[in-house]
Image: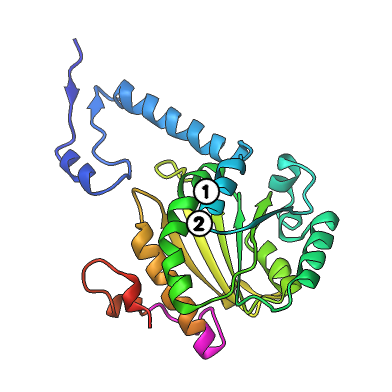
Amino acid sequence: MTTMTEDPWANLKRFTDARIGLGRSGAAMPTREVLNFALSHAMARDAVTTPIDWTPIEKGLSALGLSTLRIASAAGDRSEYLRRPDLGRRLSDASREALVRASEIEAAKPDLVILVGDGLSSLGVAANTLAYMSAFMPYVVKAGWKLSPVLLADDSRVALGDEAGEILGGKAVLVLIGERPGLSSPDSLGVYLTFSPRVGIKDADRNCISNIRQRGLSYDEGTFKTAWLLREAFRRGLTGVNLKDESQFLIEGEPGPELIG
């Protein structure tokens, strides 16, 4: 009879979701670990391919007092989106026209355009967007930032926010997007901040806050970092490699809105 031998480092698993300390059964991995790997792989594939349901997010944002507008990239469907990343960075013709009309209605230009995109993990967006926005709104209110309607974008890449932000005339654009899933994190949300958004801007001109989720970077810390970077972006007139995240020097205990002056 084959007996299972546990890896003596298995206790380290409580510190990480990484696959360590799996043990073995003879010369092979234990069956439970083989099955867990297959499940994680399936969840990652589902996160990429499953269409997002915007309705619960629309209702949740409405409860926060935020209006929304659905838009889409130039990708015709999910398959084309995955094969043609460039199309995910461009607005569809109908969405471009809708944003032009929206910009003509608003008398004053927004300080911040917020775009929520499904990206490469609809699961990450569905699981984290409302909790993130609930934690972020106190900073918006305290700072007095004017927001555009929150844009809900199908088949989107990060750069889709550049064109949308430029059309709406936002001083900055904040893109919340589902991150490429890993085998231990299929539900991660990424946040990208770009000052003076415009088509053709380089990734070096953005700031990114990654791995926002219940088992990753907390909503409180993620929104604190976002608010700090936004305040500095507006003050200095830039984002990207020349704007370093130094928010950790202000944190004592749990971050709160009072730390953003």
| Residue numbers of the magenta segment | 234-245
Count of residue discs:
2
Left or right: 233 as drawn, with respect to 40:
right
Viewport quadrant of the C terminus: bottom left
Measuring from the top left, give residue 171's x and y in whole percent: 63, 79
Residue type at tag 2: Leu
Image quadrant in which you'd find residue 91: bottom right
Is 52 or 32 nearer to us in this picture?
Answer: 52
Rendered position, 152 above or below 192: above
Residue located beneath label 2 in the image: 64
Left or right: 93 as drawn, with respect to 2:
right
Query: For the residue carrying disc 2, how many other residues have a C-alpha within 10 Å: few (<14), some (14-19), or many (20+)?
Result: few
Measuring from the top left, give residue 190's x and y in whole percent: 50, 58
Q: Are marks 1 and 2 in contact (CB under 8 Å)?
A: yes
Residue at 37 percent across and 79 percent down: it is 260
Is 155 or 61 nearer to us in this picture?
Answer: 61
Residue type at tag 1: Gly
Rendered position, 38 above or below 212: above
In terms of secondary structure, where does tag 2 sit?
loop
Residue located beneath label 1 in the image: 60
**In magenta stretch: residue 236:** yes
Measuring from the top left, give residue 2's x and y in whole percent: 20, 14
Measuring from the top left, give residue 211's x and y in whole percent: 42, 56
**In magenta stretch: residue 145:** no
Q: Is residue 131 visible?
A: yes
In terms of secondary structure, where does tag 1 sit?
helix
